[in-house]
Structures are given as C-alpha cells and as structure tokens.
Amino acid sequence: MDKLIVHGGHLLEGTVYVSGSKNSSLPILAATLLTRDKCVIRRVPDLSDTNYMVQILASLGAQVERASGMVTVEADSIRSEAPYDLVRKMRASVCVMGPLLARTGECLVSLPGGCVIGDRPVDLHLRGFEQLGAEVKVSGGNIHVKASPDSGDREVNMLGKHGSTVLGTDNVLMASVLTRGTTVIEGVATEPEVVDLTEFLIKMGAKIQGAGTRTLVVEGVKELHGAEHTVIPDRIEAGTFLVAGAIAGRRVTLKQADAQHMQGFIDVLVQCGYPVEISGAGDITISRIENPRGAEIRTEPYPGFPTDMQAQFTALLATVPGLSTITENIFPQRFMHVPELARMGADISMEGPTAIIRGTERLGGAPVMASDLRASAALVLAGLMAEGSTEVNRLYHIDRGYEHIDHKLGMLGARMERVKVTG
Ligand code: EPZ
C-alpha cells in the first residue's frame, strides 16, 4: 500500500492534459460484450478500475488486448457468470449485467458490497430488469437474472428516492438494445458518461432515440456489430485539477477537457471569484486569488453540481474566508474526508448531509487516511498549500480513478513523493 507525502507551499504553473473518463470507459467496455465482433475503445485511462474491467471481460471469455490507452475486445463466445473475486473489488462491475442479459439471456453476478460513501444498492437496476420482463433472484450474495423469452413493448422507470441512477440506466439500456420490441425508459440519468455510452451503442447499430434527455426509446435489433470509439474527457479529473489551480495555482491550464460537461462546478468557482478562462480551443485556465468568496453548494444529478466534486470543493472551501456550506443529496454519508481535513485544522461541522465550513487561514500538514477515490484526491489538494507535509495513506484509493495524479501535479510544480509501504 503506497502513501503520498505532499510538501505544502509550492505554487502550481503550467499545462495538464486530462485523461479519458473512467466513468465512461467502464460501461463502454462492458458494452463490447454485446457483439461477437471486434471493438476498439480509445482513451481508456490506465487505472486499477479499468484494469479490473478488462480482467472481468477476459474472465467472461472475451479476447482483450490493451495497448496504453487503447483497448481491443472481441467477445466471440462468453459465459454469463461474472467472477466474484473480481466483481467484489469494483462496484461498477455491476454494469456487465445488462450486456450479459442481452447477449446470453441471463447473468449471475455477485451483489456489490457497499463502500465508504454509503450503501450502494442496486434495487433500481433489478426493478428495471423486472420491468423488462426478466426474472430476478437474489440469493447467497448473488444476483441471478433471466431474460424474458417473449418479445413485446416495455416501459421502464429508473427513478429512485435520490433521483435517477447512472449505472442503473446503463444496465437497463444495454439490456434493452437486443430485446425484440420497443422499450421506453423514463427517468434516465443524463450524465455525459451515459450519453457517451448511448453514442457507442448507436455506433454498434443500436436504435436509440433521446440521448441526453430523461427518456430513451429503444427499438430492439437482432444483433449489434463492432465499432470504434474514443471516450469523452474525464470531467471529474479535470475538475480536480481546476480545484488544485484554485488552491495553489499561479496559473494552471487544462487541455483536452470538455468545459460543457463541467459547467455545474465551473459556475461555483466563478461565483467564488476565481478567474476561470475557457479558450476557443477548449483550454481551461484558472489561478488562485487573494480573497475568494465562500459558496453554498448542493450536489445534484447532472447538469447540477456533481457529488464526485464535493470532497474536492470541501478541501478548497476549508481555506476560503467566511462561511460555506455543502449539502450532499446523492450520497448523504459521503463525508469521510471531513474528519481527515479536521486533522489538518479545517473547521467543518456537520448538520445531517450538510457540511458547514468556516474558512481558516491555512491548513497544517498531517498524516491522513484516504478512504474513497474523491476523498483521497481532496486530501492531496488540501496538502498542496498546507504548512509542512501531508502524508496521504492508502493511496490505492486514488489510483483507482486518477491516472498518475502525482506525476501530473508534479509536472505543475507540486512537491510530492510516493513511498512504498511494505507489510
Ligand atoms: C456513478 O455511480 C458513478 N460511478 C459515481 O462515481 C457517481 O458518484 C454516481 O454515479 C453519481 O453520479 C460510475 O459511473 C462508475 P447512482 P452509480 O446509481 O451509478 C441511489 C466516482 O467517484 N441508488 O447514480 O453507482 C444511490 O444510492 C464514483 O467516480 C439506489 O437507491 O451511482 C445514490 O444515492 C463514486 N438504487 C443515487 O441513487 C440503485 O439501484 C445515485 O447513485 C442505484 C442507485
């Protein structure tokens, strides 16, 4: 288990290239199971999560080759049972259920465990499959789904108490593209990663109307063919570097990002007073400022402020003068970073799903514990301008979702070193 030692007080300057989206790559890699033809997916980031998905595809019988950011998949003949020891390592592997159901008529996948950001139910996925006419059984820690043998038009609704579901939408969409008849899916998630998957499925020959809206209409086809696709930029990685620039940037420029996907939090940075510039070529530039203003943030489904940026903004607002609040409406327990930021001197109190943040002059470096992907990134960001050094332990959390973050920040002038922790 590595740890990262971040030496505070070094300003950042220069250009950082944003990687392809993790949350787009995972369902799109799963979608390659829908055809026996070869698919080529480009700009897949080199992360442990995408590596797990590659291993899962191979364990299901697909031929998978990876050459840096390009993954080639040929799922000529596949099994319908996903291996427990791989599925348990990454919750997102649930998104193989839809393609397996569509391609083989059934799937057997272990129930994903919860994680530190809260329980991660899949009830909306399973309800969606049942509304497609499938038979769902959960026993012995496994989910067993059998597709309905008959064709027919279906209506599915994806809404739950916290709004829609990103991977649930992906799963039901992929389960419906080979189902004879027309499927109307209401209340779908409209995150850019869902739209990216939809566009890939259409390239494979799927007939889907309504990409980017709350309702998708799918006309089932007999089979899909291979396709090539380049995944969209990772808007959360890009946002994480924007926050790094707000905290410690003399001037930081992001390249290969898509500002349109980031408006929900770029607007907040602008409201705080940060000079965010978007060039015609799509480059996004930010610098720190002397007196930023606090913010009141509420996480919401896209295009609102994304929950995946909540921890990073908590770290930013910890040293913004005055009072700020962040209310987490998607994963109300997603505050594992707060006690760790408090160890660094942050003044944050919790009221239910709302963090009340009183800006302090400067944080102090301390040993802290990474817990989930975005919380870990928030601790690294907090260390950038903290007094002294911050030791972020359990770095594997961050390696799940950020491609060489220490290298990229180092190229901007941050001083940090990765230390191997044996035993
Ligand atoms: C995706 O997770 C992302 N992961 C998450 O990013 C992201 O935080 C989340 O969407 C919300 O935007 C990937 O795309 C791989 P949801 P997902 O189903 O699809 C509840 C990261 O940091 N819910 O949209 O699993 C759920 O508890 C990760 O990259 C149900 O109640 O999230 C939550 O409150 C973390 N029943 C809300 O819906 C269900 O069946 C949204 O969850 C499914 C979800």
Image (cartoon, rainbow, N blue to C red):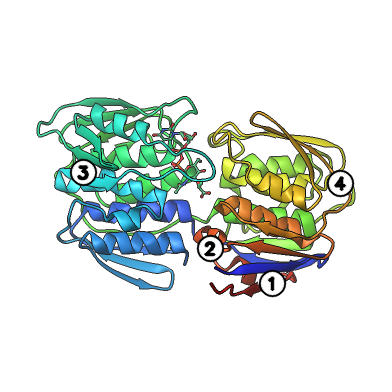
Compared to 105, does 26 lie above or below?
below
Q: Determine which residue is flagged by label 1.
A: 410
Residue 317 in the image: x percent, y percent?
A: 77, 44
Asked if residue 80 shows in the view, the reply is yes
Q: Are marks 4 and 2 in contact (CB under 8 Å)?
A: no
Q: Determine which residue is flagged by label 3.
A: 101
Q: Determine which residue is flagged by label 4.
A: 360
Instruction: Say if disc 3 is inside 8 Å of ligand 1.
Output: no
The residue positioned 24% from the left and 38% from the top of the image is: 139
Q: Is residue 216 left or right of residue 106?
A: right
Tell which tag, 4 or 1, sits nearer the viewer: 4
Residue 182 in the image: x percent, y percent?
A: 21, 30
The residue positioned 34% from the left and 51% from the top of the image is: 200
Badge 1 density bin: few <14, some 14–19, many ≥20, Cα 10 Å: some
Q: Is residue 294 left or right of residue 20?
A: right
Compared to 122, does 95 lie above or below?
below
Instruction: Name the element at disc 4.
Output: loop
Q: Is residue 82 left or right of residue 77?
A: right
* Gap between marks 4 and 2 measured at Cα: 29 Å
* Gap between marks 4 and 1 measured at Cα: 26 Å
* Gap between marks 2 and 1 measured at Cα: 18 Å
**Amino acid at circle 2:** Tyr
Instruction: Name the element at disc 3.
Output: helix
**Amino acid at circle 4:** Thr
Instruction: Name the element at disc 2.
Output: helix
Q: Determine which residue is flagged by label 2.
A: 396
